[in-house]
Image: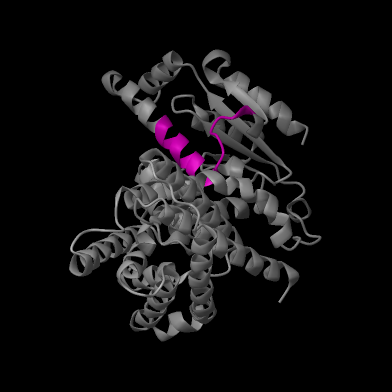
Amino acid sequence: MSKFTSRRYLLFLISLFVNAFGIAFITKALLGTSPITSVTYVLSMFTPMTMGQWTIILNILFIIFEIPFMTREVFRQDRRLYLLQIPISLCFGTFIDCSMRMLHALNPITYVSQIVTLVFGCVILAVGIALEVKANVAMMSGEYFVRVISLRLKKEFGYVKLGFDITLVIVACLLSLLFMSGIYGVREGTVIAALVVGPIVHFVSPYYHFLDQWITAPAGKETAAAKAPEHTVITIAREYGSGGHLLGELLSKELGIKLYDKELIQLAAQKSGIDEAYITANEQSIPSYWLKCMVSQNSESSLERSLSTDDVLFVAESKIIEEIARKESCIIVGRCADFILKDYPHAIKVFCYSDFENAYKRCVNEYGIKKEEAEAIIRRTNRNRITHYEYYTGMKWGEPHHYNLMINTGSIGLHTACELIKAVYSRQ
């Protein structure tokens, strides 16, 4: 085992403790606990066993119940992940009990102090989950259980996970009603935790980039520059109606290099197995940012392990863009290419924007959009692009510091913009 792999396991172990501490904090708020621990918390309320002990038992049951859903091939491929669940479950349950003892003096009385404690616990839990994602070496049994069900049923992980969490809360309520003649341990705090932890994870994850060098082995002598020192890639991010695609076409003719825009749809369909019609309709939009953060596999594991169609598509397009950059000089429109090639030494990153009046005119006169529909389409498309970009990159769309050129095509025109980019290209 390399020192970098050892560091990842150490980081994962730390994340387990942080997760447990966050759950204990949420529980001590007395407003209910997180969905994943709702059953174990309720069981601890009417039995002599602790929440941590019940967590170990329930997780071991998950491990046993996973077996019928796994084929031999899945077990062979995932044997390490499957077996790691056992020590992880033992550690996690122990950490929960330790955390509860550490916080024994924390007893918020007023409702305001309970809410503050709950929110603080959600932040701690989110920080721990983000660390777990960064480590990317193992999965907790609850997540793995959902994963094998998702694979067997061929359903998206996020929505199976949401159904799983709801089922746990319902079971917790039934146990409480049956053994305590009322609903205890499941309150507004359970709902709040379910709603806010995912978005907080997504917010804090980009701040962990400083750990990359500590847990990742150096790429070696063959860098991106060494692989393709002569290849210059122009990426064009654009507001709708700014003429980004038209600018790409002009540059392609002037520079004699290939333009990739709609061509990426076919390539992504081939690589991901996703229908081209679906990609055309959905590739640069995702559901509500809040909903996506709540149910996304990205909040619990890496994109590569996700069964979300949106995530699979993003990963497929990212790999295609990296392959194209290594192969040839070209122009790539959209698809978060500026982010995907952020470390590529020969990328010219352009952002096209326009005032609304000129964007409106271009949509009507050049794109053939009806006048009465143009304004709504411009606003909706830009909103989708912002949400998609910021969800997958953790960066602000249109932030000047991310680009080499910010071009107002409404005021200077596409031909002038083309000449500006050509001048920069000629110096590469």
Residue 156 coordinates in the image, percent (x, y) = 35, 61
Which secondary structure is most common in the magenta stretch? helix
Quadrant of res 323: bottom right
Q: Quadrant of the N terminus?
A: bottom right
Residue 5 coordinates in the image, percent (x, y) = 68, 70
Classify residue 237 as left or right of residue 181. Answer: right
Residue drawn at x 55%, y 46% is 204
- Residue 56 visible in the picture: yes
121 or 290: nearer the viewer = 121
- Residue 280 visible in the picture: no
Classify residue 281 as left or right of residue 3. Answer: left
Residue drawn at x 24%, y 62% is 173
Residue drawn at x 38%, y 63% is 37
Q: How many marks?
A: 0
* 44 shown above or below 34: below
Residue lying farthest to the right in this orientation? 221
211 or 329: nearer the viewer = 211
Q: Quadrant of the C terminus?
A: top right
Residue 85 coordinates in the image, percent (x, y) = 49, 76
123 or 313: nearer the viewer = 123
Quick check: is 351 in the magenta stretch? no
* 88 shown above or below 360: below
Quadrant of res 313: bottom left
Residue 18 coordinates in the image, percent (x, y) = 55, 59
Q: In the image, which residues are magenta? A: 382-400
Quick check: is 387 in the magenta stretch? yes
